Image (tube, grey):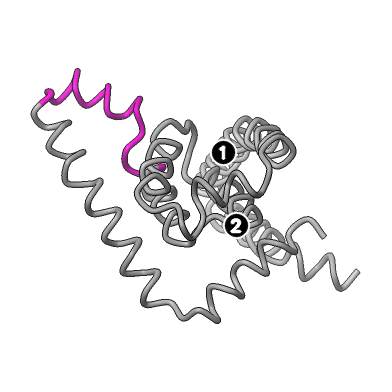
Amino acid sequence: MKVLLKRYRVLIITAVAIGILTIVNSQIGFKALSISAYSFKEMMLVIPPVFILLGLLDVWVPKETMIKYMGEGSGIKGVVLSILIGSAAAGPLYGAFPVAAVFMKKGVKFSNILIFIGAWSTTKIPMFLFEITSLGAKFAFTRLLVDIPGIIIIAYVLSKLISKEEIEKIYKQAENINK
């Protein structure tokens, strides 16, 4: 029972807070409940396909292949592959984190994981196409040409600022996710 309470404490606290809010101001409380339900529904539409793809990635792609193309010695091809995978991804940013955990299990270099997350959040192909039609090609290409080097620089700076021990802890936590 303690384990369940500890695991779901944020959900419990949020539910209690919304309950109190609904008692104090029913209009705002019901609006908060409506927004929460919408977000939950949206998340339930995104998470299952992400986990199915992760399962396939985990089974079909050997660790050695991931290390070869995105691991420590991958060089520029790891960076390019990280950007392409992140840019081709669909769905909100929270879908990137389970993918990043599988990448860690497969031995992907930390900076490439950061590049992947950065690309997922800023360089999605559908967003790029929308920008071309809405804001013009000049804006879309300029933003992309600024974002890609920015993502790479930030990823390398972060990977240098974070200690090796801390990175190892993060990788160990990713290994223990399914255990």
Amino acid type for the residue under numbered disc 1: Ser
As drawn, 178 above or below 44 = below
Q: Nearer the viewer, residue 123 or 93?
A: 123
Residue sitting at x 70%, y 42%: 58
> Which element is circle 1 on?
helix
Residue 127 shown in magenta: yes
**Seen from this angle, which residue lies furthest right?**
1
In magenta stretch: residue 165: no
- The residue carrying mark 1 is 34
| Image spot of residue 172 (x, y percent) | 67, 69
Q: Nearer the viewer, residue 65 or 162?
A: 65
What is the spatial separation of the Cα atoms under label 2 and label 1, in whole angstroms? 41 Å
Secondary structure, magenta segment, majority class = helix
The picture places residue 55, in percent across and down from the top left corner, at 72, 38
How many marks the image carries: the answer is 2
Q: Nearer the viewer, residue 24 or 54?
A: 54
